[in-house]
Amino acid sequence: MRQFRCIGIQVLSLVISIICAIDGKLFRSRGYLKDPKSDLTLGDPPTAQWFDQKLDHFQPTSYEITWKQRYFVNDSFYTNGSPAFIMIGGEGPANPIWSIQGSWIEYAKSVGAICFQLEHRYYGESHPTMDLSVKNLYYLNSEQALADIANFVSYMNTQYNISKWIAFGGSYPGTLVSWIRYKYPHLIHGAVSTSGPVLAKSDFYEYLIVVDQVFKVTDPKCGPAVQEGMFEIERLLQHQVGMRVLSKMFKTCNTLNANKAKDVSTFMESVIGNFEDIVQYNKDNRAFEGADNSDITIDTLCKIMVDESIGQPIERLSSVNDLILRRVEKTECLDASYTNSINSLGYHNWTGESSRQWIYQTCTEFGWYQSSNQTDHPYSNNFPAKFFEDQCIDIFGTHFNKKLLENGIRRTNLLYGGKNPTGITNIVYVHGSFDPWHAMGITKDLSEKATAIFITGTAHCANMYPESSQDPYQLKEARKEILKKIKSWLE
C-alpha cells in the first residue's frame, strides 16, 4: 500500500492519505497506488522536511527515543482560515509529486487547502530503526502508524493553530484513514477511505471470486477459457515431461520440478496473477503515473483468451504470460522459484525495497492472502491460504506461525471494528466494482454520516487519479460527490 496555517481563527485541515496495498512476487504487488508521472507545467514538487517522531508511542519511558519522519508541504492554495489536507503514506516511498497532482489537489484548489504529505514509518526514507531485522520490525504496525499521524497532527495544531483534520486514503492508507477517524475522532474531523480493506482475514479467497465476476462482465467466454487453461496446466503438472513442456511454454527461469511443490504453487499463483493484477488496475488512468502499459486491460487479456486461432486455452494463457513478461514485468523469464522469492525477502538493510516490511504486517496484523480456496477450485487448488501463511515462517522464523497470525487478525478486528466500526461519522468509503479489494471493504452505507460510494466498472483507487476524458460517467460523478462530502464537513 502514499500519503497528507493559519494565524488567528481556526484552520480546518483535511487529511488525505493516498496509496494502495502491496503483496510481494510471492505476495505479488497487488494493491498500491503507483507514483504519478511528473507534469512539468505544474512546477517543481516541494522539498522534503523532517519531523521528530517518537519510536514507541505506548511506552512513556521510551518517549525520548525519536527518529526522522519525512513529509512534504504544498501551501499554494492556502488562504487565512482555510482547511488543510494531509496525504498519509502507505507501504512505499512518499513521492512529492503527489503534493502537486491527483484528485485531492483539485479538492484542495476548490477549498483553498494547505496540503501535507506524510510518509509511513519503515517505508521510503522514514527509518525508525537501524535495520529491518525481526527485532526492529517490532515497531512496525498500524497502531504505531496511527499514533504517528496523531502526533504529527497534534504538533501541527500547536505550530499553525490548526483545529480540524479530515483524512483521505486509498488501499492500505484508505484503511488507515478509516481507522484514524475511528480511533482519534478528537483530532480527525472526517475521512475519505478509497479501496480500503477494513476486515482483516487470512484466507482472502474472495479476491478471485471478484476476478471471475469481472471475466463474466467482460466476455462470458473469458472465465471458462482461463479455467480450462488452468486445468490443462494441472494435468501437465502430473508428470515431469509435462513440467518441461510447461517450463518452455511459460518461459520459467528454471525447469519446474515435481519434487518442489512450493515452486509449483508459486508458478500457478503467478499464472493467474497475470489476470489479477490487470483486473485490479483496469482502465484506471495509470498513464498519469508514467506507466507505459496502461493500454493492457482486462479486455486485452480476454480478447486473447477467447481467440481460438491462438490454439488451446493453455496456449492462450501462455500468450497472456508472454505479454505480461514483456510489457509489465519487463523480463525474459518467469521466476517460479519459491526459494528465490524467500531469499529476496531476507534482507535486513535499508535497500529501498518495501516488500519485507509489508509482508511482516500481513503476517502479524492483516493476512489478506489471495488464495485458491474458492468453492470447486475453478482456478486450481495449488495456492491455498496455507501456502502464504507458511511464507511468514520461512521469512521471519518459526514464531511467525498461523497462531500468531490468527491472534493478530483477531486483535486488528477487535481494535478497529472490521466492517462495523460502530459510531463512526463523517466518513465516505469509496470502492470500484472491478477492484477485488472491495470484498474486504465497506460498500454500503453504515448510517447517514458514514456512507459508501460503489462505482460500477472501475478499479482500485480509480477515483484518486486526475479526471480523464475517457473516465466513465459514474467515476466523474463519484469525484463530485466526494467533494460535496468534504465541503459539507467543512461547513
Image (cartoon, grey):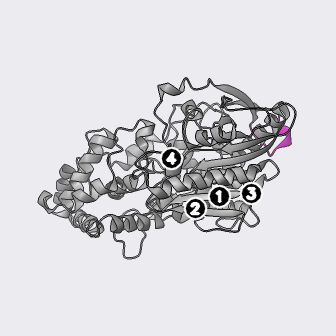
Residue underneath mark 4: 32
Tell which circle, 3 or 4, labels the residue nearer the N-terminal end.
4
Mark nearest the camera among 3 and 1 is: 1
Q: Whole-Å distance between the Cαs marked 1 and 4?
A: 20 Å
- Asked whether, in this view, residue 411 is left or right of residue 163, the answer is left
Residue underneath mark 1: 428
Disc marking residue 436: none
Q: Amino acid at mark 3?
A: Tyr
Marks 1 and 4 close (CB-CB < 8 Å): no
Q: Amino acid at mark 4?
A: Tyr
Disc marking residue 453: 2
Tell which circle, 2 or 3, labels the residue nearer the N-terminal end.
3
Determine crowd level at label 2: few under 14, some 14-19, many 20+ residues with C-alpha closer than 10 A: many
The image quadrant that residue 51 belongs to is top right
Residue 153 image position (x, y, % from top left): 77, 40
Q: Secondary structure at mark 4?
A: loop
Determine crowd level at label 3: few under 14, some 14-19, many 20+ residues with C-alpha closer than 10 A: many
Q: Whole-Å distance between the Cαs marked 2 and 1?
A: 7 Å
Q: Whole-Å distance between the Cαs marked 2 and 3?
A: 19 Å
Residue underneath mark 3: 182
Q: Amino acid at mark 2?
A: Ile
Q: Secondary structure at mark 1?
A: strand
Residue 52 visible here = yes
The stretch in magenta equals 55-64
Residue at screen point 29% across, 41% down: 327
Q: Whole-Å distance between the Cαs marked 3 and 1?
A: 13 Å
Marks 2 and 4 close (CB-CB < 8 Å): no
Residue at screen point 74% across, 37% down: 55
Q: Whole-Å distance between the Cαs marked 3 and 4?
A: 23 Å
